[in-house]
Every structure is written in C-alpha cells, then in structure tokens.
Amino acid sequence: MSTAKVEHIQYFGRNAIVLSNGRVRAVIDDLGGMTPEFSLKRGKGAINAHWIPDFRSNSGQPWDARVHAPYWKGQVLYTLAGSFPCSPNFGADCTVDGIPLPAHGWTANERWKIASAEVLQRKAAACARFTLQSPRADMPLSYEKFDVVQRDDPAYYSVMAIRNNGSSPLAINIAHHNTVGSPFLQAGCRIYVSARTFMSAPLHTEFDDTGRLAVGAAFDSLKKAPCRSGESADLTVVPGMIGFTDFVTGTVPKNAHLGWSCIVNPVLKLAYVTFFPGPRDLPEQEISLSFNDLWMQYGGRNFTPWALHEGGADRTFCLGTENAVGAFANGLAYSRAHPELLGVPTTVTIPADDERLLFYGTALVELDDALARAAVTGIEAEDKTLVITTAKAYQRVTLDGSFSSLRALVHTLREK
C-alpha cells in the first residue's frame, strides 16, 4: 500500500506543489495553475504524459510584453505546460463588457495563492488548496481550487469552486486544457472521446492557415473527418508530424452520467484518461463540461514560438484533449455571441452572490493486453472504479470514478 505525499518546490520563478503516491506524481505550479508533470512510475523512472514545450520560458523573469511579446506572442505561451484551468475565458484574448481578458483567462495567466498543502491521514490523500481573485472589480469572480492525489489511485483530481461576488449573474467559459506530449505521445497513439457529434473550427480562427480539415464542417465520426482536399481523415489515430494543426469540438451526450476522453499508447500499454461528471442527474451546484475538444498540434505553425523563427518549420508535436464549456476555443466574446453550438450551451452562468463547482479527474491507466490492442467503446463510472470497455473486453480501474470520495473530502477541507 502506497502513501500519499506532499512536497513544496521552487524552480525558475515558479512555486509548485508536488502531490504523489507510489504510482503517480503531479506537479502543480502556482503560476497559471500549470501542471507540467503528471507521471506514472515505471521501474526506477517514470513516464510523464504531459507536454512541456521546448519554448517554455525558464528564465525566471516575469512576463514583460515589451520584451517577450515579439517571440511568444502572448503571456500564456510564455508559461504554458501540461494541463491547466481556463476561466472566465477559453481561447484567444478578447474584450467582454469592456473588460480585456487574456487568452484562456486569468486562471491560466495569474499567480495562484498556495493557501495550504497537506496530507490528510484519515482520508489517505495529499491535498493542495489554491485561491485566485479576479483582477477586475467589474467581473468580481473568485476561484478556489483543490488538487488531490489519493492513496493508490493512478489519478489526480482537481475541484474548482467559482464564486460570483457581484449582484448580477455572469456568463463565463470554463475548461480544463489537458495537453499530452512526448514521451507518452507518439505516432500511432489512438484517440477516443465521449462525444458523438463533431464540428471542425469555423472560418476566421487561428486554424485558417494551419489546418487540413474542412472549415466549419459537421460530422458524426472521428474516423471520417472531412478534409479541405475533399478526402476524409481518421482522427482517432495520431499521425505524427504531418505539417498541420487542427481543432475539433464534440458535444458530450446530454444523457451521459460521465464525460470523458482517452488517449491510448498501444506500445506503452498506457491510457491517459480525463473524466468529469456528465449532465445527467448533475447536482444543481455543479458544472458539467459540455464539449470534448481536440487540439491536434502536428505541425503547421511556421511562426514563433512554435518555430524557431518567423517562417521556420513548426517543431511542436502535442495533442490537447480539452474539456470545456465554450464555443470552440474562440473566447468568451464569441461564446456569448454564439450561445449554442451543436445544440449545447457555450457558457455557464454563475448566479449573483453564489458559486458553482467543477469536479475533474485525470488518470494514467496501465492497460491489459486486450484493451491496449482494441478500440475503446466507452468509459463508465462506478463508486470506486472506472470501467473501460471495448467491443470484446473491459477493465476495471480502482479510482474515484463517481467523485463520491472527492466530494466528501472537499466538503471536509472547506469546513476547516
């Protein structure tokens, strides 16, 4: 039986909390809530599934637009790594109600306060509590985030409470921007999501000049996504560096108890799984993420920081499995102007003087041989397990698939 642990570290101007047990390790930065490492122990080493861009700044210097913008283009790219929370904006920077919002929102750009980090022995869990206040009094949001690793679970959990301290309701975006990279991500990895209806990015986005997919096309299978060439592409198989970057959104079914995405590395026999409560029978105070988004960064961005210089070759290979309430990744202003996409709301409303909570999990699952070879057809949650199924086999993974233990844990932490 392993033991949950907490550690404080500092590196390159960042303060971070390390949550671990004998199986997995998660490193969560205070700056932007970035999680550059989520790794699974293998032998004497570990496999980190999260993407750490080679252009991520390690100077230790704070963002200075005059100095850094010409190369990095925006602050979030200066500190980008792994997974991170996006709110109140998801996507490009925009202005809403006269308020300028940075790309992916304050949660991805501001420095969170580390309020506490501890091991709860009775709960057998390592926990970190972060807080963040809106920098704008005219959008008076506050965020409280709990990151948790429970004993023996091959997962880390994140719970974010969003409070509206104002007198009027606020319609916002919210997302978890999970991004995987090498050594986990390789050509031949396979992609599965809970969504069943999809649409590629519309016209006038950052993918206009980088994509191979037809613009603004609706389709019902990732295996047959329409391309600009008139052919179709199988998006379920990661092709490697092909010189294109695309974005696809898909709607989480309205009758789903669980939303999820899954990337399988058949060589490592390892699955990277994100999961969250679905819209069916959701408690009133909780948020369900409406969209499975895929950001397929397989080349195509021949400009900095993706390339070494303007006009150079894109050297960046990663895959975003972003679960969100937002219209594509076009920002809050676009979402408010397009309140529905594929029949699903693109914003979540936080009532005045009230809050909403989002429960979220990320797991690294070692697969049985049968599951490593076959296509994933579904993922379901039971109280203490996550059940991954294929056409002919299934595997039960011991973790908090229903979030029941996590709900009780967070309640305890918030009562302290």
Image (tube, rainbow, N blue to C red):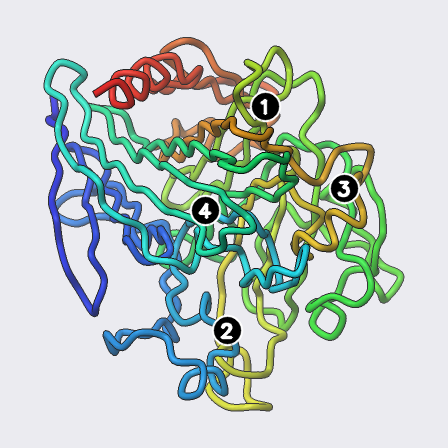
Q: Residue at x 64, y 33 (%)?
A: 349
Q: Position of residue 371 (x, y in %)?
A: 47, 28
In which quadrant of the rendered view does residue 406 lie?
A: top left
In the rendered image, the vertical position of residue 93 relative to residue 19, given as above or below: below
Residue type for callout 3: Phe
Q: How far separated are the C-alphas under marks 4 and 3?
A: 23 Å
Q: How far separated are the C-alphas under marks 2 and 1?
A: 37 Å
Q: Which residue is mark 1?
A: 378
In the rendered structure, find residue 74 and report the number of the disc placed on it: 2
Q: Is residue 175 left or right of residue 346?
A: left
Image depth: mark 1 or mark 4 in front: 4
SS for dot 3: strand
- N-terminal-most mark, 1 or 4: 4
- N-terminal-most mark, 2 or 4: 2
Q: Nearer the viewer, residue 188 or 354?
A: 354
Q: Which residue is mark 3?
A: 198
Q: Is residue 186 left or right of residue 225?
A: left
Q: Residue at x 77, y 36 (%)?
A: 197
Residue type for callout 4: Pro
In the rendered image, the vertical position of residue 100 relative to residue 18, given as above or below: below
Image depth: mark 2 or mark 1 in front: 2
Q: Position of residue 55 (x, y in %)?
A: 39, 75
Q: Position of residue 336 (x, y in %)?
A: 75, 47
Residue type for callout 2: Gly
Disc 2 + disc 4, Cβ < 8 Å: no
Q: Nearer the viewer, residue 288 or 82?
A: 288
Image depth: mark 4 or mark 3 in front: 4
Q: Nearer the viewer, residue 91 or 235?
A: 91
Q: Quadrant of the N terminus?
A: top left
SS for dot 1: strand
Q: Residue at x 15, y 33 (%)?
A: 22
In the rendered structure, find residue 85 and report the number of the disc placed on it: 4
